[in-house]
Image (tube, rainbow, N blue to C red):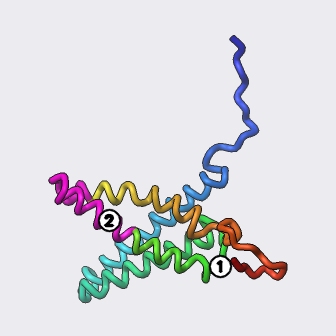
Amino acid sequence: MKIRKLDRSAPPIFLNRPGRQAARYLTVGVMSAAVYLVGTWFFVDALNLHVIVWTGIAYALGTTLNYLGNFYWAFGRAASHLYSMPRYLSLVIVGFVYNEAITAAGVLGFGFEAWLSAFVAASTWPILCFAILRVWVFAPAASFGHAQKAGGETFG
């Protein structure tokens, strides 16, 4: 049996494109969640402002940071805002529906505790979301059958 040498020319997984995107996606997600949580604490607990209004504002701030961080840093501006933003907002809505469906199925269908169902949704959605962001939301427009004119406009 011949022993093969380890190929040191291949970069570690976190340096290849999907690995780098995943690490940056995770970083952006943690930062966005922190903005949401700290914003909620600051607006509602520290300043004693209305909980419904200000948790919504904190969520909007965290979501905005998430979009911009993923657009500019994690996935590298492969398409325009005009192309990516509607897809991102659609994904936010799908995420809400996914969360509700998983939580309801767990509680009503299987008799799980609400926290367990929410944990399942919260731990599986980021994986699905990364894949959707990578192949649909922030993918180059040309990768979905859009032809590109010489001037850079897309049509199709």
Q: Residue at left 23%, top 54%?
A: 116
Residue 99 lies within the magenta run: yes
Percent position of residue 14, x then y? 61, 49
User: In this rendering, is residue 128 above or below 41?
Assistant: above
Q: Secondary structure at mark 1?
A: loop
| Secondary structure mostly taken by the magenta-highlighted segment of the chain | helix
User: In this rendering, is residue 8 above or below 80?
Assistant: above
Q: Nearer the viewer, residue 114 or 40?
A: 114
**Mark 1 or mark 2: whose residue is earlier in sequence:** 1
Q: Quadrant of the N terminus?
A: top right
Q: Residue at left 60%, top 69%?
A: 138
Percent position of residue 36, x then y? 38, 74
C-alpha distance separating marks 1 and 2: 28 Å
Badge 2 amino acid: Asn
Left or right, 91 with respect to 100, comes to right
Badge 1 amino acid: Ser
Q: Quadrant of the C terminus?
A: bottom right
Residue 129 lies within the magenta run: no
Reading the image, the residue beneath label 1 is 80
Reading the image, the residue beneath label 2 is 99
Can you tell which quarter of the image residue 23 is in? bottom right
Can you tell which quarter of the image residue 103 is in? bottom left
Farthest right residue in view: 150
Q: Which residues are magenta?
A: 95-117
Q: Residue at left 15%, top 53%?
A: 111
Q: What number is the disc on residue 129?
A: none
Mark 2 Cα-neighbour bin, 10 Å: few <14, some 14–19, many ≥20:
many
Q: Residue at left 37%, top 78%?
A: 59
Q: Secondary structure at mark 2?
A: helix
Left or right, 67 with respect to 93, comes to right
Evaluate if marks 1 and 2 touch, with contact meaning CB atoms under 8 Å apart. no
